[in-house]
Image: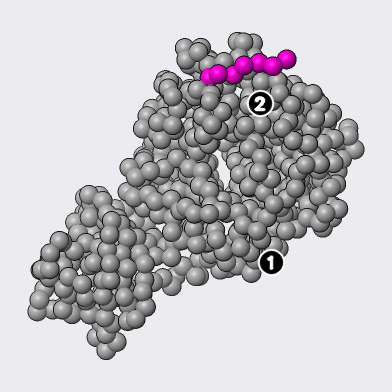
Amino acid sequence: MNKTISKVLVANRGEIAIRIFHTLKQMGIKTVAVYSHADSNSKHLRCADESYFLEGDTIAATYLNIHQILSAARHSGADAIHPGYGFLSESSEFSRTVRAAGMSFIGPPDEAIRLMGNKIEARKLVQKLGLPLISGASGTTARLLNEADQIGYPLLVKAAAGGGGKGMRIVASPDQAEDMLEIASIEAMNYFGDGEVYIEKYLDNPHHIEVQLIGDEFGNIATLFERECSIQRRYQKIVEEAPSPNVSPELRLALMDAARKIAREIGYFNAGTIEFLVTGNQFYFLEMNTRIQVEHPVTEMITGIDLVREQVNIAMGKPLSFTQEQLTINGHAIETRVYAEDPLNNFSPSPGKIIFYQAPSGKGIRVDGYLESGTEVSNHFDPMISKVISHAPTREEARVQLIKSLESYAVHGIKTNIPFLISLLSTQSFISGEADTNFCNLFLENEFLTSQETGMDPKLLMAAYLFATRQTGNSAIPAWNRLGLWRINPRTELVINGKSVVENLISPDATTVVIGDNSQKVYTLTSKAGNEMIINASGKKERMLHSSDETGRLFLQHNGKVYEMMGASRHLKENSKTKQFTASVKGSYSLHAPMFGRINQIKVTAEDQVNKGDTLLTLESMKMETRITAPENAIIKQIKVSSGQLVQDKQVLIFLSNI
């Protein structure tokens, strides 16, 4: 029976809310946003027709609060709710409550969400169907510890109620098991409201392949081919593509057939994804996600199907707008997830204010995001800030096009993984399509960190700094003054990405500078407009983007790398405002917060004796749980924080003393 949907509340935030609003507006459907205090200035509010505030300071009190979201839907007059992904998207209680309130839930049946949303129940069902499974176990912590020895190490701890890499930890040996079970459980509770976890045998070097499916209430189920999702960091995908370069036509048919078999068994309708691990031509069921996926754009690009539009039409009781036989693969699409994180610091979260934002565009390029200049990236949420998708006739064309787009993508003010993505897409392993689920860690350790040690020519950076910060007019005096330069000693100093760079600066004027002693180089400003400038460096033209903030920091972008720069005298003045703590080799020393975040657990007390590697406390930032461990055998002298406390980057957490 057809149902009318005229107004939809999206129970989500950020880029996925904006993406759903886009299709709803094309369909002539009114839109409603919800937001927490941390999102009070978010772009997704301005993309909706109206918005409602969710009271509370935590995700559990806001985006996971069914009562508040239903109340907002009632007040707005919405007749349907779309959950997006994450948060309540795989909560059968939420879908059931929405439907009981007389609204349409734009998603699958309640029972399908319950069965497949819980990964333990999903494994039981798939086992009944006779599909291949990876060995695993569920139950109490004591049972899991016992079963772990039977399954064998290494193994994975995984959240029963969620996905997206949350509540997932690898356990290399028995001595790590109890700690990792606890941490994964805490992270799962924080993100999904359910701390149940299970264990699974860890496969060496598999490929992570998933099949997108969608069905209607008339029993029609279509599979929209597969996506390659093997490139992951911290068990969370960062590069996805469709179709997979590692799936043969025969394997593709087998995977899609298995996906349809599972969907039919549970009476599934609406969008969903079946995930598999693949080694050679052997595949194993991993899990089912009963929602729209983060990586759905690559499927949309190669099929021409708007998955959100199909979701809404299905919720209105309409059949699929296409048949399985009508689907074809058109070209190749690659998506990269852009995260607010620092790859050079173990991908630690990097929340903060966006000083300057400029997204790439052009034929075959799609950007799903929520940022703009001035946006405050909060430490309360997942660090993904956008997705850049490239679509072209061939995989190689899509890859090259994507690299160029990322190189022009400006996100100044915070650290991002854009340089990491550019380097990764340029590796032979990616070009050949061989990269598996272990690729990221190996690439980070063996190639990326080494490649980042050699950056752009410091002389060019210094010239660019002068041109970017020069005052209007032709006077050379502001350039000297800004660098704190003495005319009798033309050596000047800049701090670039925290490191001091000293060069001789000769005869700077409005458009030309000469830098260096024996190897002098001449740099000429060719053009400068807005945040872009072009410099002629001894005959080679260099295009750069630049921005600055009120503290005097200059952000300079070249080929996708962002350099944070400041005159040495200004840098010294800024740093003197904050007392710095450093560890001493002997005696007492302190441990600092590696990032902004909230203290979840403190596992020690004053005067405790700890061993090297012991967990002292856990810190949550951008939905990631981080363990702060003892660097050596020591005695806890003083704990400077409390459970639940918000801490700043580099804030002192604990004082210790050597044994």
Closer-to-camera residue (353/81): 81
Where residue 398 appears, as percent x and y from the top left, is: 60, 59
Q: Residue at x 50, y 66 (%)?
A: 449
In the displayed structure, 378 sits above or below 205; it is: above
In the displayed structure, 38 sits above or below 571; it is: above
Q: Is residue 254 left or right of residue 91?
A: right
In the displayed structure, 619 sits above or below 538; it is: above
Q: Magenta residues? A: 1-7
Q: Is residue 466 visible?
A: yes
In the displayed structure, 449 sits above or below 604; it is: below
SS class, disc 2: helix
Mark 1 or mark 2: name the one nearer the start of the chain. 2
The image quadrant that residue 145 belongs to is top right
Do the residues bearing badges 1 and 2 touch, measured as CB atoms within 8 Å?
no
- The CA distance from mark 1 to mark 2 is 39 Å
Q: Residue at x 41, y 38 (%)?
A: 378
Q: Quadrant of the N terminus?
A: top right
Residue designated by label 1: 432
SS class, disc 1: helix
Residue type, numbered disc 1: Ser
Residue designated by label 2: 313
- Are there few (<14), some (14-19), or many (20+) residues within 10 Å of tag 2? many
* Of labels 1 and 2, the one closer to you: 2
